[in-house]
């Protein structure tokens, strides 16, 4: 049934630290690699090479530029399914292919039931679902359901491929319904947020927001001169060498 | 949103078909059986063309039968079930009338056809109305447009091809539907221009607003993908204005002129040609408006991909 469960026993999900992500796309690549060979139909590419490459990805990294008081920042922003508690993609499904699991809260597609109408992709405000151009069924992040419970894998590999591969430790996986879990502790310690709360989807995945690291008051003052930070301080032996080499 | 021709044909044709069905239920009982049977058959044909067209939007059409299973939560599933029920009732009604069977049961069946036709068109509209991710669709005006244009398309069908079905009062109702339907559509279009992405913005999408103004800097990949092709359709302001004008001209202004001609040149050949042209123009206007319903509506996913202000 595509009705949503009233509650789930656990809320497995990701916590993504936007302060740490460097936008290297390792999680994107490992997600594609695992999911093209794991659960369900392979993640197809209409055109993997050439001048106009295109294919299905379950995890994509966007980059945003922010600007305040003449200070700009670049924030890399990985985005995949948020495994929402009130997932609008599930209830719209007419075939019963989309469902949210009671045991762990993962939102999945039963590919043997999907007729490829695409309505769930329209219903998702985040763009987390993509149609497979070859299999003709909807693909989405499974939270690596075929890794996290897989007893054939060494224990340290039983987490989503994106989390396992992240070289900067920007991604964390765990049960967000358990207040003692690592992910819940992170969320409690840092400022975190639901994406698009106004869409009332109650996402499980949480984003840790960048910490403000500049003294913005000082930078905002009209007397502040950014160039002074870069000007050469005279004096000392290094200054003497520097002057000598510059021919002064 | 990408204006897929299969979905536009689906909602326009099934809307007209169930509109004919609605008026058949209202007008059918007081009329002779051959015309009623033929009209019922035409309602079936129009609605079926629409429903068959919707199958072309599916990537795995062989599994379409499953779409009837999730009526508890899914408007698309409800639409499918109601459509089949309505078609079944119309078919039964045609058969009963073909054998000249009358009675209270047939009368009630006609009313059920009218109710089911309305419910089916309402469900079609709710497939789109329910999507909060497309703020332009998420309004009570959406079902009003679908129902209004369905009653207009169906009613005009009688006005053009079966005027003997209509009393003078009903011919006046056609005029009210004509003006009313297009007024709702114009209100919807004005709301669309104002609503943008609704309560969503790049700040709510990224939650980065505390760092200042937020702008998309780099998309995930160089080229387009399923999401940008499906939800990133963009119509220029000038083209939108032209097409809106064309829709109103074809669907409202010319039909009003034709309506006047019909009443000035009563029962002449000229009036009869005008009646038929009226249906063609109304239908083409509805078709363009339905194309715009998709092409002009924006999806919140695009907030992640590009500057949507």
Image: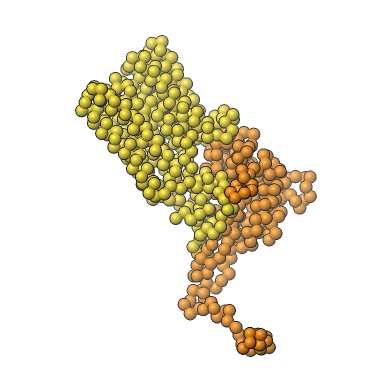
Q: What residue sits 38% from the left and 12% below the top?
A: B102
Residue B246, position in %: x, y?
Answer: 34, 40
Looking at the image, which is closer to me, B24 or B182?
B182
Determine whether, in the image, residue B239 is placed left or right of residue B70: left
Q: What residue sits 66% from the left and 88% below the top?
A: A244
Residue A131, position in %: x, y?
Answer: 59, 41
The residue positioned farthest toward the left in the image shown:
B264
Q: What residue sits 49% from the left and 62% below the top?
A: B213
Determine whether, in the image, residue B54 is placed left or right of residue B115: right
**A76 to B185, vertically: above or below:** below
Looking at the image, which is closer to me, A140 or A16?
A140
Q: Which chain is orange?
A: A
Rendered image coloring scheme: by chain
Residue A87, position in %: x, y?
Answer: 56, 44
Task: State the image quarter where residue A91 is shown.
Answer: top right
The answer to whether residue A201 is seen in the rendering is: no
Q: What residue sits 33% from the left and 43% below the top?
A: B245
Number of marks in picture = 0
The answer to whether residue B157 is seen in the rendering is: yes
Determine whether, in the image, residue A139 is placed left or right of residue B201: right
Q: Colour of chain B?
A: yellow
Of the 4 image quadrants, the one containing the C terminus of chain B is bottom left
Residue A94, position in %: x, y?
Answer: 55, 34
Determine whether, in the image, residue B9 is placed left or right of residue A201: left
Task: State the image quarter where residue B264 is shown.
Answer: top left
**A70 to B8, vertically: above or below:** below
């Amino acid at each position: 049934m595509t009705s949503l469960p009233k509650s789930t026993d656990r809320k497995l999900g990701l916590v993504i630290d936007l302060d740490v992500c460097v936008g290297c796309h390792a999680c994107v690549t490992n997600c594609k690699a695992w999911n093209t060979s794991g659960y369900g139909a392979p993640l197809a590419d209409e055109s993997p090479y050439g001048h106009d490459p295109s294919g299905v990805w379950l995890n994509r990294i966007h980059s945003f530029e922010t600007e305040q008081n003449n200070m700009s920042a670049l924030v890399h922003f990985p985005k995949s399914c948020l495994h929402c508690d009130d997932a609008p993609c599930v209830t719209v499904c007419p075939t019963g292919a989309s469902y949210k699991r009671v045991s762990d809260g993962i939102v999945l597609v039963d590919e043997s039931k999907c007729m490829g109408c695409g309505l769930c992709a329209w219903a998702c405000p985040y763009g987390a679902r993509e149609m497979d151009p070859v299999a003709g069924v909807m693909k989405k992040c499974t939270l690596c359901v075929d890794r996290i419970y897989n007893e054939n894998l060494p224990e340290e590999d039983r987490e989503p491929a994106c989390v396992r591969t992240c070289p900067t430790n920007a991604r964390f996986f765990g049960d967000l319904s358990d207040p003692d879990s690592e992910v819940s502790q992170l969320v409690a310690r840092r400022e975190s947020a639901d994406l698009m709360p106004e869409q009332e989807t109650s996402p499980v995945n949480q984003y840790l927001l960048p910490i403000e690291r500049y003294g913005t008051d000082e930078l905002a003052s009209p007397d502040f001169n950014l160039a002074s930070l870069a000007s050469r301080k005279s004096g000392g032996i290094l200054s003497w060498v520097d002057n000598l080499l510059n021919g002064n | 949103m990408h204006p897929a021709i299969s979905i536009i044909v689906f909602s326009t044709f099934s809307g007209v078909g169930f509109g004919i069905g609605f008026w058949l239920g209202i007008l059918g009982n007081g009329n002779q059986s051959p015309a009623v049977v033929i009209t019922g058959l035409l309602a079936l044909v129009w609605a079926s063309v629409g429903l068959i067209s919707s199958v072309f939007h599916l990537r795995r059409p062989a599994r379409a039968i499953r779409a009837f299973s999730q009526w508890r939560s899914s408007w698309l599933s409800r639409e499918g079930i109601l459509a089949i029920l309505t078609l079944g009732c119309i078919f039964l009604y045609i058969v009963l009338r073909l054998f000249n069977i009358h009675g209270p049961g047939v009368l009630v069946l006609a009313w059920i056809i009218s109710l089911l036709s309305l419910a089916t068109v309402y469900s079609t509209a709710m497939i789109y109305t329910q999507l909060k991710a497309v703020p332009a669709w998420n309004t009570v005006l959406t079902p009003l447009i679908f129902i209004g244009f369905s009653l207009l398309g169906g009613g005009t069908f009688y006005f053009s091809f079966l005027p003997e079905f209509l009393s003078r009062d009903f011919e006046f109702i056609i005029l009210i539907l004509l003006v009313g339907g297009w007024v709702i559509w114009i209100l919807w279009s004005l709301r669309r221009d104002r609503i943008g992405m609704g309560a969503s913005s790049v700040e709510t999408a990224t939650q980065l607003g505390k760092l200042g103004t937020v702008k998309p800097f780099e998309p995930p990949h160089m080229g387009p993908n399923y999401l940008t092709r499906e939800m990133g359709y963009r119509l220029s302001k000038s083209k939108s204005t032209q097409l809106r004008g064309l829709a109103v001209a074809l669907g409202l202004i010319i039909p009003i002129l034709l309506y006047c001609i019909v009443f000035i040149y009563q029962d002449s050949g000229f009036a009869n040609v005008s009646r038929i042209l009226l249906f063609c123009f109304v239908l083409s206007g509805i078709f363009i408006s339905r194309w715009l319903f998709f092409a002009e509506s924006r999806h919140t996913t695009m907030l992640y991909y590009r500057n949507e202000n």
